[in-house]
Image (spheres, coloured by chain):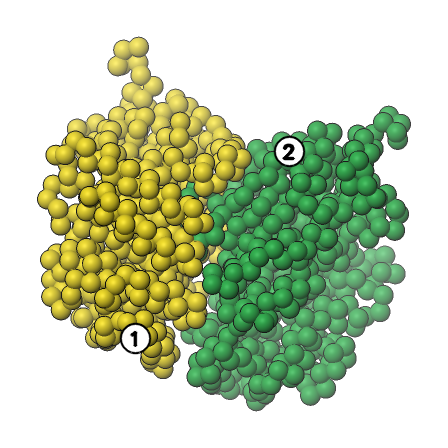
Chain colours: A yellow, B green
Amino acid sequence: MTAETRPVDHVIAALREFMGDRVTTNASIRDQHARGEDTTTPVQPDAVAFAETTEEVSKTLALCNRHGVPVVPFGAGTSLEGHVTPVRGGISLDLSRMNAILDVSQEDMDCLIEPGVTRHQLNDHLRDQGLFFPVDPGSHCTIGGMCATRASGTNAVRYGTIRENVMGLEVVMADGRVINTGSRTRKASNGYDLTRLIIGSEGTLGVVTKIRLRLHGIPEATSAAVVQFPDMKGCVESVIQVMQLGIPVARIELLDEVQVAACISYSKLDNLQILPTLFLEFHGTEAGVKEQAEAVEGIVTDMGGLGFAWAADQETRNKLWTARHNAYYAAIASQPNSRGVTTDVCVPISRLAEAILGAKQDIVSSGLSAPMVGHVGDGNFHTVILVDQDDPTALERAWALDRQIVARGLSLGGTCSGEHGVGMGKAEFLEQEHGMEALAVMRSVKIALDPKGILNPGKIFRN
Amino acid sequence: MTAETRPVDHVIAALREFMGDRVTTNASIRDQHARGEDTTTPVQPDAVAFAETTEEVSKTLALCNRHGVPVVPFGAGTSLEGHVTPVRGGISLDLSRMNAILDVSQEDMDCLIEPGVTRHQLNDHLRDQGLFFPVDPGSHCTIGGMCATRASGTNAVRYGTIRENVMGLEVVMADGRVINTGSRTRKASNGYDLTRLIIGSEGTLGVVTKIRLRLHGIPEATSAAVVQFPDMKGCVESVIQVMQLGIPVARIELLDEVQVAACISYSKLDNLQILPTLFLEFHGTEAGVKEQAEAVEGIVTDMGGLGFAWAADQETRNKLWTARHNAYYAAIASQPNSRGVTTDVCVPISRLAEAILGAKQDIVSSGLSAPMVGHVGDGNFHTVILVDQDDPTALERAWALDRQIVARGLSLGGTCSGEHGVGMGKAEFLEQEHGMEALAVMRSVKIALDPKGILNPGKIFRN
């Protein structure tokens, strides 16, 4: 077959008929769509299409389905597991220009947005209305991407993940059909839960083109605190106690001493020592926040915490959480010329100390540098294993360490991914985690909804 | 075909080989499995099988699948929408004997149970451990049935529905394969959300044989209150304000004056007047409960509430909530010889007053009696339309009223079912609610997972 007769070339020509120069084969744009922030081998798509409407997405999918051409949805490109790498070529469908906030209801505390809206954009828009969208993975991701990967982040311990905060979706199916899922009501028992089926399906079952989100009232009072510990054990055990007592903390984030060192350098947190640290936030009424903070202070003091530094004013809080959000970039910056292999193990809270202390030992044994952060109230922690891009053995050693940390997580009743998703990076663990039969059921659903396998092929399933 | 050669007879004979006399064709037992608490026409199954293990469920499904014989899972028989009516005969698979509580983890605040466990049984078991399972539909249903119908009830406004409180399931698929879904972790992004796909699928995609539930700590303090209103408008608008202010009430239940009259008579609530009424409950710390209750008291007073009667002691609270739980039976008892057609409309909270006041007008116009209760914090309310079983026109008139109330709910952006499920009773509304294409996607999933259509046929989909 010559290059001119490839199905993808037919598709590109047909896409140009209605999207014009928003369909491009420009090398540098294809390069920007060749992978996310991960360590997968970059693969250029045959073309990048910047969709602006649901109709364009629908026509694109119908065309690609007819010709058997892969489609890989693309948002902000912040994926950590190879989700946006077009491993089989085809069209990278960039949705970042579909970024309208279509409707906000103060009365019903919900909103309707397009998938390219980022959480920063949404929260800036909502601020004057006393509302906020709590799900906060830290990065500048799009909310469409958050739906695709079932994202969560620092606030999930209190407000739930994206799964609990999406009420309904508009989704374009593989053949171009447009469906609406869910309901504007707080609950419903009205047929199969297609919303939850699409959330976390990583672009393999359909492309999200609108999202109805649940919003929350900005709390009357917010305060934050930092507490450092002489060792990791007291730090983790404090978290376990806070959770077991049901104290409704809004955020409870762990940074190990390696990560704290990186943050001190990257984010100028000069008042911190290089020790395991918790960042905390409390939301509620004035009295409620005080009560929660006092309860937590009692626990961390008992566990050997070195003081409880309040950050009640907005500026100190912002500095703290900006540093936390930049933790990944601080980690990457702590070793020149590196990229990160990220683990995302999540375990039942009772096994958190074992999982974290074990991972710390594995890191030491590996000889690699791997700062650790964690949404520890949910039992979820990340190690960013730093890979020197000039060291040809580093990537393989990083994956070996990743496998070790995941294996321990699974043996403790945990999951290989708390929030980043499967993509390519975690696909090898799914059979062990779910069993062959459950994975076969997932495949049946995939085949039923995308019989030609055009939607983000090579992700979640290994083949 | 003679009776002896029917496929179902082969299945019954084969089932007896491993279940013995737990497979029965006894007429009175078949009659008990001919419908739930609804008004569907009773249909006897060909046999009832009382399963005791996952393996038996698996073998039963494999057999029925091979012979194309319908299987209808049965729990406590409290369904209100015809879910357990074996409209195409076959095997009623009774899971009520699978009622072991297999494991409770205080540390992780979760438990593993069999599907026949009722919420009463579970909460009795948990009480000494300081834990409770909050989802409370009122009836003596099984938790397996609650998973099947995506149930919720009085506490959902604070603790979520069953959907948010199930961490994972063991499910037997149509062909007998046993899968495990979900994870023991608080969150996971590890492939398709099969747990949420099964929850609310009403026995049409698989049979649940084990359930891992999230539990909650019994709150430090609980208090309850009753407030009556001279009219429905002030009552509903109080609810809307409480929700919009984000006050974390644990329960906020509405009873209209017709239902209050029924409860006064059935549950001896002699201190109440025959007026629209809210039952409230607050959970939290001592200070938190006080703060919430004072905030609500301020709102209801502004809205014309006639006092705020505290029920701080356990005995008064129990009497109140027992009366609320028996509201359905009180409604049925208020008119001799009647059964109920139940509406289950749920709307966005901003449309609740319109939905309820409109429904009240429809009831008056219909000339039927239909007490109303509601989990109004979620925008969900029920009318129990009373059908005199000796009046041959009553059922048709009740359905006409049901259709009117649902139609208004849908026009207000609501759903035909907040928590009872679709079954047969609400199937006619699904196409309007979801659109033809979304319904077609649901059907594709059904066909993929149950290609022979043996699992609870005739439910959710009209065909």
Name the quarter where the C terminus of chain B is drawn: top right
From the top left corner, tell me how far across and down residue B83 is, in percent.
70, 50
The residue singled out by tag 2 in the image is: B175
Looking at numbered disc 1 in the image, what kind of residue is underneath it? Thr
Say whether residue B255 is left or right of residue A134.
right
Residue at the image position 15 percent from the left and 65 percent from the top: A273
Name the quarter where the N terminus of chain B is drawn: top right
From the top left corner, tell me how far across and down residue B457 is, in percent.
69, 40
From the top left corner, tell me how far across and down residue A44 is, in percent.
23, 28
Residue at the image position 30 percent from the left and 31 percent from the top: A86
Along the line of sight, the residue nearer the viewer: A424 or A306: A306
From the top left corner, tell me how far across and down residue A290 is, in percent.
33, 80
Count of number-bearing discs: 2
Along the line of sight, the residue nearer the viewer: B159 or A62: B159
Looking at numbered disc 2 in the image, what kind of residue is underneath it? Asp
Residue at the image position 28 percent from the left and 33 percent from the top: A85
Q: Which mark is residue B417?
A: none
In this rendering, does residue B43 appear at all?
no
In this rendering, does residue B269 appear at all?
yes
Q: CA distance from mark 1 to mark 2?
A: 56 Å
